[in-house]
Image (cartoon, rainbow, N blue to C red):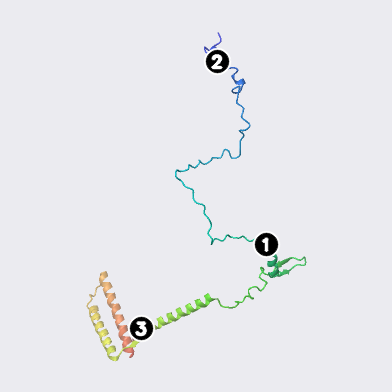
Amino acid sequence: PLRYISKYSEFVRREAEKNKFQWKTMGPAKVAVPSPNDFLQKRSKEPKPAPKKKEEGEKLLPLSVPRRTYHPVIRIKKNFIYKNALAVIRGEPKKPQHFCVDTRQGDKYLLEPSGLFPKYTRKKNYGVIPKYVTRRNEEMKREEEEYQASVLEQLKKKAMKTLSEEERTNVLKALKKNWEEINRAFLSLPVVTDTRYRKMHKEELELKLQQLEHDIAAIENHKTVYIANV
């Protein structure tokens, strides 16, 4: 069979021959050579502010003349060498540091940061109680006195008083009368207590009778009775 031939082959060949030698020059053949005077200057590419337009009718400010009372600041040159020498002469001499040698090889360490040097015992205020401790002790003492005074006042308010013979007799009669009323109610209860309410009512009356009997016996056995003022 015949070999396949594209119908565009002739067109491609013509286009290739048409633009065959255009890349030989690498651009236009004649290029303008830059002038030697137009060299790149320093800071020439930095943005520059727009020139300020002078407004119409703008007047220049008058020159300021210093007043007669103006005294210019006169800078005095300092002699640092003389100043440093004077500071060294008048300064206190450097004191030697206390250290301790604990080995025969000569290993030594400073005494002051080690805690062996009596640093704090030589202070002027050593052994003096601080002011805040004294102030705190005074506050605690004052609070204790106020508390004791309030306790005494409460005890005075709740002081015991003695019942007179007439009051004792009246209280005893009232207790016995109350006991008789509760005893009458107790005796009036039915013989059979088959319900929960009857059982609870009977137990309540028994407790009241026991308490009244205890109070009556206490008042009868003691001639002097004290009560609290509540």
Which mark identifies residue 91? none
Left or right of 144 in this view: 70: right
Q: Position of residue 108 (x, y in %)?
A: 73, 66
**Contact (CB < 8 A) between labels 1 and 3?**
no
Left or right of 145 in this view: 95: right
Q: Residue at x 48, y 80 (%)?
A: 141
Q: Residue at x 50, y 77 (%)?
A: 135
Mark 2 neighbour density, 10 Å: few (under 14) some (14–19) many (20 or more): few
Name the N-terminal-most of marks 2 and 3. 2
Q: Nearer the viewer, mark 1 or mark 2?
A: 1
- Residue underneath mark 1: 80
- Residue type, numbered disc 2: Glu
Name the N-terminal-most of marks 1 and 2. 2
**If the image is split into quadrants, where does the C terminus sit?**
bottom left
Q: Nearer the viewer, mark 2 or mark 3?
A: 2
Q: Nearer the viewer, mark 1 or mark 3?
A: 1
- Residue underneath mark 2: 15
Distance (Cα) linking label 1 and label 2: 89 Å
